Image (cartoon, helix red, strand yellow):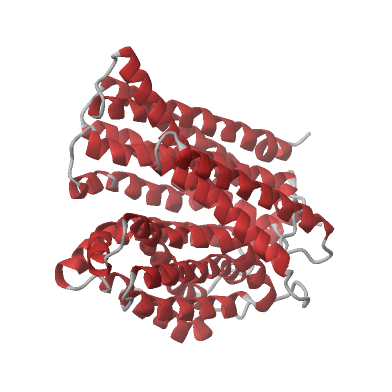
């Protein structure tokens, strides 16, 4: 059974936290090493923004192939996370991490030397599989390296910050490399950090031996989880990016529904297996379920606002890609600040209370963005209001992830880490999809009512409209945290 947590802190619990073995220099050096794959996985999600035109021209890729080159990496990460988490528990986190890092380096070389669009699509898909092995292994190792709660929360915050940095610098890094080298350089940049991880990992990282059974993986469950997640994430993203109606939208909706049905079959199979691919108690027990629901709702709200903000900068404000990218940096900066401040606050107050307060900050930022957006104020004020969301989101995401991971038995840390990554991936996909739907509805309403012209005016209305949706979603998440995570801890 999963351990029950969330009640009043007893003297015994306080003693355990106080006397927990604190990490030494080797663990912190290992954390520095673990930052590398987190940076590379995040960078690879965005580095193609500037490189894609060069790749398309050189490989004579069609528009459809170009989209697959860009998105298949993220699709496969989402699709294989559950399997990767189980593997981390079974074969050992360090072993999986080093194997995944080696594969990532080799595949990066193959991507850089691809001679056809088809080859690059296949390699990018395999890079996604390799990338999915890194995330659960990272968090499993953190639990071994940092048994003290305060230090583990800080380590998780540092990794989240590294991911934010990697995603932010990806387009800039791609632009810098393309100024001097061919498009293959955006993949080759992954190789040195991964090789460094492979060389130094055995010395600085704990073994993390697998402890959750020696049976064979249920391949049917693997196939169902991969197919279901691919269907859901692909359907959501295509519905968001594609036209608002017609046969294409019907096809994408059908893929989404089929993916959801396959995931239903996956869940049903897990109930019946004596050694399931995913122990469903990791996601159905009250504490982790509330944390995962919070991640999902918050992701839908914040990602949708951020996505429409980037569109607003270019379409409504008329900024170029580089200038628009610079105006997103305040969000990234305060997101990192929030993540790094959260562990210290959680040491002074209960982590659940800090999460609830952080969600309130996000709601305030969403409301402020809505007000500022409707008023049509200049870009600096809008960027500042969106940054308020980033501050709250950085603090909440780091602590909620720790709640998910620390609630799981040690032998299932990899699977727990995979569930929080899946929740984050779905939040991202849903955020983009739902915000896209809201933008279409706003544009249609503006055109029919004559409230704004097509194009720039309608785009300017989409951001504040979705900010209201985000405030409601994150408000629901805050209510969930208070009712399930905060209140049970009050003494009766």
Q: Quadrant of the C terminus?
A: top right
Q: Is residue 188 left or right of residue 76?
A: left
Q: Residue at x 35, y 46 (%)?
A: 334
Location of residue 218 in the rendering, given as x and y in whole percent from the top left corner: 74, 69
Q: Residue at x 67, y 67 (%)?
A: 86
Q: Is residue 47 above or below residue 399?
A: below
Location of residue 413 in the rendering, given as x and y in whole percent from the top left corner: 66, 64
Q: Toward which corner of the image does residue 266 lie, by quadrant?
A: bottom right
Q: Toward which corner of the image does residue 391 lie, by quadrant?
A: top left
Q: Quadrant of the N terminus?
A: bottom right
Q: Is residue 388 left or right of residue 417?
A: left
Q: Is residue 196 above or below residue 169?
A: below
Q: Toward which corner of the image does residue 111 lie, by quadrant?
A: bottom left
Nearer-the-camera pick, 167 or 106: 106
**Residue furthest left as drawn:** 180
Q: Is residue 223 left or right of residue 443?
A: right
Q: Residue at x 24, y 36 (%)?
A: 315
Nearer-the-camera pick, 151 or 296: 296
Nearer-the-camera pick, 391 or 251: 251
Residue 349 is at least partly visible in this image: no
**Residue furthest top as drawn:** 449
Location of residue 139 in the rendering, given as x and y in whole percent from the top left corner: 57, 65
Location of residue 249 in the rendering, given as x and y in whole percent from the top left corner: 47, 39
Q: Is residue 140 above or below residue 233?
A: below
Q: Is residue 403 left or right of residue 29?
A: right
Q: Residue at x 39, y 73 (%)?
A: 119
Residue 227 is at least partly visible in this image: yes
> How many numbered circles are shown?
0
């Amino acid at each position: 059974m999963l351990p029950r947590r969330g009640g009043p802190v007893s003297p015994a619990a306080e003693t355990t936290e106080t006397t927990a073995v604190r990490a030494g220099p080797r663990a912190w050096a290992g954390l520095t090493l673990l930052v590398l794959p987190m940076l590379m996985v995040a960078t690879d999600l965005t580095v193609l923004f500037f490189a894609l035109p060069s790749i398309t021209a050189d490989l004579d890729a069609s528009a459809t192939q170009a989209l697959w080159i860009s998105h298949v990496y993220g699709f496969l990460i989402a699709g294989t996370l559950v399997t990767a988490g189980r593997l981390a528990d079974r074969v050992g986190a360090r072993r999986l991490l080093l194997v995944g890092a080696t594969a990532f380096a080799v595949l990066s070389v193959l991507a850089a030397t691809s001679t056809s669009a088809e080859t690059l699509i296949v390699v990018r898909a395999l890079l996604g599989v390799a990338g999915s092995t890194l995330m659960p292994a990272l968090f499993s190792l953190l639990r071994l390296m940092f048994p003290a709660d305060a230090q583990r929360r800080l380590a998780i915050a540092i990794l989240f910050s590294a991911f934010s940095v990697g995603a932010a610098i990806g387009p800039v890094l791609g632009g810098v490399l393309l100024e001097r080298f061919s498009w293959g350089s955006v993949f080759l940049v992954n190789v040195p950090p991964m090789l460094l991880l492979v060389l130094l990992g055995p010395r600085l990282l704990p073994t993390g031996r697998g402890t959750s059974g020696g049976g064979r993986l249920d391949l049917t469950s693997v196939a169902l989880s991969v197919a279901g997640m691919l269907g859901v994430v692909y359907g959501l993203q295509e519905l968001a990016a594609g036209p608002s109606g017609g046969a294409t939208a019907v096809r994408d909706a059908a893929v989404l529904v089929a993916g959801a049905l396959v995931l239903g079959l996956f869940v049903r199979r897990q109930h019946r297996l004596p050694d399931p691919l995913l122990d469903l108690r990791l996601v159905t027990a009250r504490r982790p379920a509330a944390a995962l629901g919070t991640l999902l709702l918050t992701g839908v709200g914040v990602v949708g606002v951020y996505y429409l903000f980037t569109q607003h900068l270019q379409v409504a404000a008329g900024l170029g890609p580089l200038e628009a990218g610079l105006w997103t940096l305040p969000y990234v900066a305060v997101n990192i600040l929030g993540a790094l401040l959260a562990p210290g606050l959680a040491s002074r107050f209960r982590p659940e209370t800090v999460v609830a307060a952080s969600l309130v900050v996000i709601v305030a930022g969403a409301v402020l963005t809505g007000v500022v957006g409707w008023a049509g104020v200049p870009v600096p004020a809008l960027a500042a209001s969106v940054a308020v969301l980033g501050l709250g989101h950085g603090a909440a995401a780091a602590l909620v992830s720790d709640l998910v991971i620390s609630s799981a038995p040690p032998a299932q840390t990899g699977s727990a880490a995979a569930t929080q990554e899946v929740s984050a991936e779905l939040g991202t996909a849903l955020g983009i999809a739902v915000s896209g739907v809201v933008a279409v509805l706003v544009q249609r309403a503006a055109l029919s009512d004559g409230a704004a012209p097509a194009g720039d005016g309608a785009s300017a209305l989409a951001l504040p409209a979705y900010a209201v949706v985000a405030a409601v979603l994150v408000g629901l998440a805050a209510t969930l945290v208070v009712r399930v995570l905060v209140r049970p801890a009050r003494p009766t």
